[in-house]
Amino acid sequence: MSGLVLCDRRMIVFNFLPSKTLHPSRYADYGVSRDVAGLDAVPAVSAAWHRRWSRSILQHEGLLDAPVTDLDTAGLPVAVLPYERLAMLARRLGVVLCGPRLRQAISGDAVRALQAALGEDALGWIKRGRVLHAGLAGPMFQDAAEALRTVSVAGHAALYAAFHDATPRMGRRVLLKLPRLSRERSSGKSPHPPAGTSQPAGVAPPSCEAAPQRAATSRAAPPPPESDASESWRDSGWDSGSSAIHEEVTAALDGETAMALALALLDEPAMGGRDGISAR
């Protein structure tokens, strides 16, 4: 059991307000302003804009009438993580997968540089990670910057692998929260907020009860068949500088193994368990 309920704020945001967790690398694709963080300081205006952006995003993705309602769906505790917590999980996944290379750093300066780049708790995960996964062998990182880049790619590649076989209503929503991949296939559309949304002030924010009703009563076209919708993200890859580690992770982890690793990390007491990492 996920411990979630449909009216949980995490489920509402995941299903109906994807603009709140949209990765910055995808802002331009959906007409989301890079000043969105500033808008959040003005709740009334922010709520109205997020409703419009989110509706546009969901409509473009064929998800307007396709919320995730099965609370026992595999990976749901990971899928609904708030943006910052999902990034934290990706970082920890990357540290575990790159553990063999990170453990080659033996000098005090190198260890301190890694800790500064990867976080105060990085050393603990480097040591404990081998219990969860043997990691991927490779040469010692040249510097902390290279380690940080590789760890980030490895962790996000693991999340892509974990949701590789998810249904589009789950997989597409998770994809929106992750960094854009350079070879990610696209329909070529460049969605933007619907016309007439330039003056959102005064519009009430969505309520827990109203959000599902709005989606259920919309007149948008039904989502495309799931096998077709998923093809826009299954064949994606990272840029040339990061493709090697991405390919290593993809070869080493099938979807089931990647999901099991993500859930195992989520359950680790050091991460606060599923409740701790999921807390806002």
Image (spheres, rainbow, N blue to C red):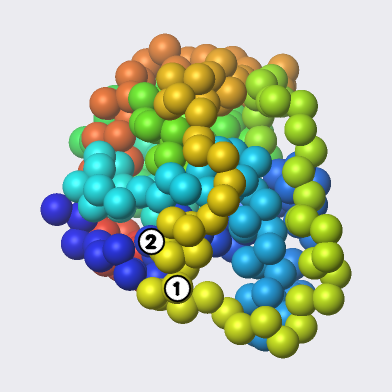
> Tag 2, which secondary structure?
helix
Which image quadrant is residue 197 in? Answer: bottom right
Q: Amino acid at mark 2?
A: Met
At horizontal 56% and vertical 16% (from top left) the residue drawn is 235
* Structural distance between the alpha carbons of marks 1 and 2: 14 Å
> Tag 1, which secondary structure?
helix
Residue linked to disc 1: 210
Asked if residue 101 can be seen in this view, the reply is: no
- Residue 144 location in percent, x, y? 63, 41
Question: Quadrant location of the C terminus?
Answer: bottom left
At horizontal 42% and vertical 12% (from top left) the residue drawn is 251
Q: Residues within 10 Å of mark 2 (few under 14, many from 20)?
A: many
**Of 105 and 138, which appears nearest the observer?**
138
Which image quadrant is residue 189 in? Answer: top right
- Residue 66 location in percent, x, y? 43, 45
Above or below, 37 relative to 30: below
Residue 144 appears left or right of 6: right
Residue linked to disc 2: 11
Q: Amino acid at mark 1?
A: Ala
- Residue 62 location in percent, x, y? 55, 38
**Of 196 and 148, which appears nearest the observer?**
196
